[in-house]
Amino acid sequence: MTTVARSSMIRVALLITLLSLAGCFSLSRQAPPQQHYVLGAGEARERAALLADPVTEDSTGDVIGLRPPRLADYLATPFIVVRRGGHRVEFSEYHRWGEDVGRAINRTVAGRLAARTQHHRIEVAPWPVGISPDRMIQLQILHFEGLATEPPGDTEGRAHLLATWEILRAGDGAVLARGTTDVTEEGWTVGDFDGLVNLLDAALDVLADDLARALQRAPAP
């Protein structure tokens, strides 16, 4: 091969590479930006004040500790999940949680429990130094997602939370109470992820209500 021919082939190869890179950059510019969402919007200041207010020494309230929740494997992802039909799930690449979803659920439930049971101190694991819970709550989150039709087309969707929970005595792990919270919130417009997060947030209110009632009925440790 002559030097001229070799130089021509190198120039062609470089041109192809540059065109390919230009195409990639073009596609990247056309992709929508990622949106990130958090639970409990608008309530963080109130919850922080409640959580920071210590139980006084003469208080009869217990220290209630929330263990890290157990999530169904498909929920342990930064992507907001939408279920279509009975078996298909979609992971929303451009709509993501702004924090670990398990910690977000625990934080939100703890804040709302603190507002409902102000004579108790609510803590989330890991416990602060020097604090030992009297009772513990173990959540298992089985569904926490949007529901949409299969095949796609209908814009009417719902939000679904399904959680089982146990209240445990801290000393020996004995189960003091257990239950299931199953909430379906209507009114989600499929594709409106801000609306979906608001409905999932509202479903956690119901979970906090159930836990507050169970704590009231459960025997003291």
Image: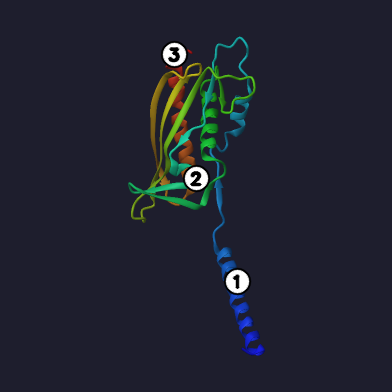
**Label 1: how many residues lie within 10 Å, few (<14), some (14-19) or many (20+)?**
few
Question: Which residue is under mark 2?
Answer: 77
* For residue 108, above or below residue 218: below
Distance from disc 2 to disc 3, alpha carbons, whole Å, reads: 36 Å
Distance from disc 1 to disc 3, alpha carbons, whole Å, reads: 67 Å
Question: Which residue is under mark 3?
Answer: 219
Quadrant of residue 144 in the image?
Answer: top left
Q: Secondary structure at mark 2?
A: loop
What mark, if any, has residue 158 been given in the picture?
none
Q: Earlier in the sequence, mark 2 or mark 3?
A: 2
Q: Earlier in the sequence, mark 2 or mark 1?
A: 1
Question: Which residue is under mark 1?
Answer: 22
Q: Position of residue 130 (x, y in %)?
A: 64, 19
Q: Position of residue 7 (x, y in %)?
A: 65, 85
Q: Quadrant of the N terminus?
A: bottom right
Q: Residue at x 57, y 56 (%)?
A: 33
Q: Secondary structure at mark 1?
A: helix
Q: Earlier in the sequence, mark 1 or mark 3?
A: 1
Q: Position of residue 67 (x, y in %)?
A: 51, 28
Q: Amino acid at mark 2?
A: Thr
